[in-house]
Image: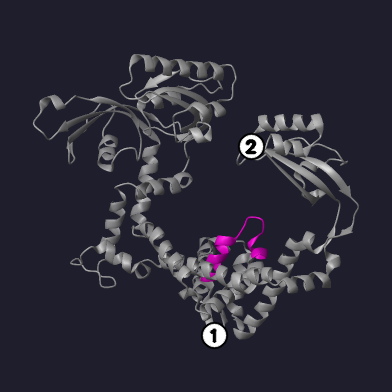
Amino acid sequence: MHTTKLLSCIIALSLSISVRAQVLFTYGGKPVEAKEFINAYRKNATDTESDSIAVRNYLEPFIRYKLKVRAALDLKLDTLANQLSDLASFREQIKPQYLLHTQTLDSLVRQAFERSLLTIETAHQFIPKINNAEADTGFQYMGYITALTLPYPFENAIYAIKDGEITRAIESVEGFHRFKRISSRKTTGKRTVFHILIAVPEGADAAIVTEKKRLADSLHQLVSKGANVVPLAKQFSDDKSSAPNGGLIEGIGVGQFDPVFEAEVFNLPKSYHPSPVFHTDYGFHILQFVEDIPPPKTVADSEYEIKEQLLQDDRRFIATNALIERSIGKYGLTRDTKDKEAYIGRQLEKFNPAYAEQIREFRDGNLLFEIMDRMVWRKATADQTGLMNFYLKQKLKYTWQASMSVTTITSINRESAELVKNSYLADRSADQIRKLYSEIALVDTGRYEQKDILLLEGVTPYEGYVSGFHTNESDGSVSFVIIDKIHPYPAQKSFEEARGQVINDYQEQLENRWMETLKKKYPIQLNKTTWEQILRKANQNTLLTAL
């Protein structure tokens, strides 16, 4: 039994290796390896189709993609100023993440994740290097910290001791630091809240403080009685980062804000009743609970977020130094080379194949857009005569099904939508809505097929019908529609009515004709043996995990 399993594994591994090493097809004599096809398929595969179906469907689009990029290169479009500029910017944008040793970075990510499962109540003592005994103020309360809250040497020291213990002195440029680990607890996750800040200027006299407190108390009373906190935060809050979003602060964790503020955040009851008005050095605050975000269960759940933080943290240099150490002796890099990181960066495509692959993909994607714009998209849009002739030859294809002329009114929120709708119902005039409510409502008219009008699903339409509301979750805007006229069907679409669809169809025709030309210029030769090996893995639905 074990021998059979071992033999199956060996066969599968051999198949995987052979597929990776072989050429899948050539175009005009230029080879494309199976691994490039499979990697591209992996990035574009969806869960809606099995491998056995999807991989067959993906071959033709992939071939067309390679032909288009080849045509762009033959036209030297990669030498255009905009192409060179975009590529240079992209190189610099992604370079930092590749100037790191992957295994070391992964180890740091795992460490940060494991530490993030614990929050530690901490106090800090700072002893300056100047000879001034009074400057040592003893241990000061810091609140709770967790992974990536403090510089790495401080974090290491705190996580290395037990509750109640004090770290050794840690030297910095300014002086010496010691930390007391007061207590620890499992991380409960993060919180999202609404926040209103009534700021108190530094050095404000008692009269100003009293005035600010009175305003905060008034707002608190309104929210306590059920008033929507969002418009109040937009109008009154001095927190410039959250006020434009109605006071919303998402994903608050420990060690991010003032300890008093954080304590109030995590003491909030899970209800819509606001926190009491409380005071910090910034002023008076009001909080309202929105939701709890549970801590990630696995490192994979938070890997992206942690990596982003690590790239901004001193510990990224640990991964950079590990890369440098393992690169000594490659491509002319020696221990005597000055600025080894810059040396690797200048030749990063040699040192890091994954970086080279991402650069190639970006370049090819840009070239694809450039060549498609020249040969298909812009060409179709500009060819008015060709578009009209194309429409006339198959105009019966462009007909209206069940359609109607509707007025769509979109307001900034539910309250304004109800106001506008009640106003419309009072006098049935969309023109009046345009005149009276232009600052809070957008009025649009047009003819659409009934199946494309979201708010008419399941409705028996009639002229004059006013729909219910639809809320756009992305921005909170609220819409409703009015049926102005129901048209008979089927009915012929004019060229202007069908213009968008005609352009799309004409572009498809231009692209197909262009592809015929490219396939003659760059003949395709498929390696049937390699293709059958890929299909065999696809039929087993293991292609995505085969390599």
Task: Return the mark for residue 439.
Answer: 2
Task: Name the amino acid, label 2.
Answer: Glu
Q: Position of residue 280 (x, y in %)?
A: 36, 23
Please report the bounds of the magenta region as a residue range: 36-54
Q: Is residue 320 above or below residue 183?
A: below
Rounded to the nearest angstrom, the CA distance separating label 1 from label 2 is 62 Å
- Residue 29: assigned label: 1
Quarter of the image where one finds residue 457: top right
Q: Is residue 392 magenta?
A: no
Nearer the camera: disc 1 or disc 2: 2
| Residue at x-position 40% and y-position 48% | 308
Q: Residue at x 49, y 78 (%)?
A: 76
Whole-percent x, y for residue 460 in the image:
87, 41
Nearer to me, 515 or 163: 515
Category of crowding for the residue at label 1, using alpha-carbon neighbours closer than 10 angstroms: few (below 14), some (14–19), many (at least 20) = few
The residue under the point 79% across, 36% down is 429
For the residue labelled by badge 1, is the local secondary structure a helix, a strand or a loop?
Answer: loop
